[in-house]
Image (spheres, rainbow, N blue to C red):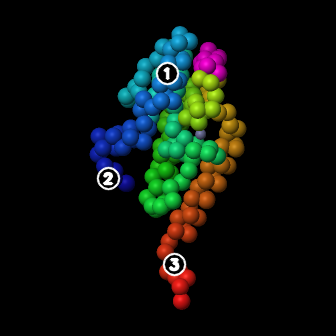
Amino acid sequence: MPDVVDKQTRSRMMSGIRGKNTRPELLVRHELHRRGFRYRLHVRGMPGVPDLVLPKYHAVVFVHGCYWHRHPGCRYTTTPGTNLEFWIPKFHRTVEHDREVIAKLRDQNWRIATVWECVTRREPIEEIGETLGSWLRADGRMLELPDLAPSAGLNDLDVYRQTSMRKVAESQPDHDDPTP
Ligand SMILES: [Zn+2]
């Protein structure tokens, strides 16, 4: 299937979605730096252009906005009230893209940490830094903050998808006119 937008446009679209140098990302960066970790930022040529790459630990860190990346079961993962026909497929593409990125990075043996925006609003950055730091120094393959059982995450995502698709179906005009 042909791509309808060229590479440059697509990367601009994706970077718009990704929201680089956001406040949560800066918090995580500064905290890791304070703890002595050194990283490269937004490394082009790597799947998903990770926010932080720590070659020494063979690890990457994504700091995801809950809304755009559809954090499962999160209060910030709201759905717009209108234009669902536009938004739902767009959200699905983002979620699919993120899954593909993780699969590719795993294939390349990268360790992957995902820090969701909501945890940076809820918990002191020192605690997040402590957890991230311990994970980096150990050998876990994946880390997600806030911690969520993978199965719970998938179930939530499936529920989200079903709900959103039903909303799309319900939003189709059916010419209900309550006035006689
Ligand atoms: Zn969240």
Q: Quadrant of the C terminus?
A: bottom right
| Residue 54 visible in image | no
Location of residue 20 (image quadrant): top left
Marks 3 and 1, Cα distance to the nearest angstrom? 50 Å
Q: Secondary structure at mark 1?
A: helix
CB atoms of marks 3 and 2 within 8 Å:
no
Main secondary-structure element of the magenta-colored stretch: helix
Density class for disc 1 (Cα within 10 Å; few <14, some 14-19, many ≥20) is many
The stretch drawn in magenta includes residue 128? yes
Q: Amino acid at mark 3?
A: Asp
**Residue at image mark 2:** 4
Task: Establish if 25 lies above or below 5.
Answer: above
**Residue at image mark 1:** 29
Q: Quadrant of the N terminus?
A: bottom left
Which mark, residue 174?
A: 3
The residue at 33%/40% (across/down) is: 12
Task: Establish if 67 lies above or below 131.
Answer: below
The residue at 67%/33% (across/down) is: 147
Tell which circle, 3 or 1, labels the residue nearer the N-terminal end: 1
Tell which circle, 1 or 2, labels the residue nearer the N-terminal end: 2
Residue range (magenta):
126-138
Location of residue 120 (image quadrant): top right
Indicate which quadrant contains ligand 1.
top right
